[in-house]
Image: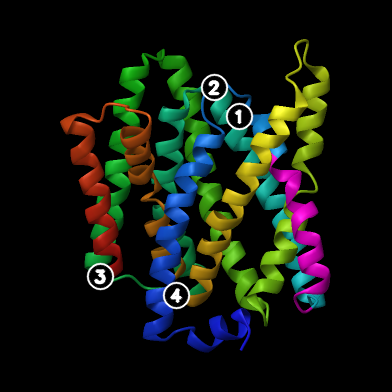
Amino acid sequence: MSPGEWIVSVQGTPTGQAAAMGLALVSAVAHAAFGAIQKGRHDPWLSRGAIDVWFPLVSLPVALFLVPPPGPELWLVLAGAIVIHTVYKVLMAMAYDRGAYTAVYPIVRGTGPLATVAFAGMVFGETFAPGQWAGVLVLSGAIFALAVLNIRRAGLDARTVTHASMLALITGVMVAVYSVYDAFGIRLSADPFTFLAWFFVVEGLVFPLIAFRRWQAMELRPNLGPLLLRGFVGSWIAYLSFGAVMLATRLDKVGEAVALRETSVVFAALIGWLFLKEPVGPLRAGLMVMVAAGAVLVEFG
């Protein structure tokens, strides 16, 4: 039995639900690392372009030789994915341009679960129990509180905070849009790995061109060698992060998978504390506990 056949065989079963939870948590850990690739002094447009340029190079052999070909309907879905993900990436880069990473990132991640649960209910008819809704509200509320804490510590002016926050909120809605759209695509494909392979092929067709034009227009151009090496590492993290959560949405509820993925903010803080010696503090630690508690309620509420 191939991996794709196994995924299909356990879809909607207790085994599939357990696998979806595990995949979503794997995605959360990888997503924390992926966010760090775009963090700091590096230009967010160039960082994203350097990551995406590797997607077709690695995925095309898999798409051509190792998975069944996509049908006509799936090609239409993949064309739509190019548009949706490009809009998301442009908004994300614009938000990073206008605000500190530590302020923008939690707003995006906090908006995503709320909007995804609503959209998944409309598209797939998913329903959440009251305890699960409470979990979503606790999780997103704690992430938003982290954003407020980070904004205060960053000392950003009101104008910058307003512009960056609005862009981050819109980007968070786009996270929900692409999460539900990608879930529709991977469920449409008979073999989920057909969608994944071709998804990553088309993912790398647009943004590297945008990033290259930006690089050409710079007065002080960064060296492409280290940038591409950083992108290569980021691309493999992206495969794990986005691939795992998309498989989770094939196996179980989209809203649950996305909510669990947003525990990435907890793993990001743990990585910073354990390896970068970044201080956490009692308030931040308490918010992390609330994020984790919200995720538990979403899964078991």
Q: CA distance from mark 3 to mark 1?
A: 36 Å
10 Å neighbourhood of mark 2: few (<14), some, or many (≥20)? Answer: some
Quarter residue 209 falls in: top right
- The residues bearing labels 1 and 4 have C-alpha atoms spaced at a distance of 33 Å
Q: Secondary structure at mark 1?
A: helix
In magenta stretch: residue 81? no
Q: Quadrant of the N terminus?
A: bottom right
Residue 51: image x %, image y %? 68, 41
> Circle 2 is placed at which residue position?
98
Q: Are marks 2 and 4 in contact (CB under 8 Å)?
A: no
Question: Tag 3: residue type?
Answer: Phe
Give me the C-alpha separation between circle 3 and circle 4.
Answer: 13 Å
Q: Which label's residue is closer to the chain start, 3 or 4?
A: 4
Q: Are marks 3 and 4 in contact (CB under 8 Å)?
A: no
Lateral position of residue 21 relative to residue 30, left or right: left
Horizontal arrangement in the rendering, residue 44 relative to residue 9 (left or right) = right
Q: Are marks 1 and 4 in contact (CB under 8 Å)?
A: no
Q: Nearer the viewer, mark 2 or mark 4?
A: 4
Give the side of residue 15 with respect to residue 63, left or right. left
Residue under pointer 4: 252
The residue tagged with tag 3: helix, strand or loop? helix
Which quadrant is home to the C terminus?
bottom left
Amino acid on which the number 2 mark rests in the picture? Arg
Q: Mark 3 highlights which residue?
A: 300
Magenta residues span 51-68
Residue where numbered disc 1 is placed: 94
Residue drawn 47% across the image and 56% down it: 27
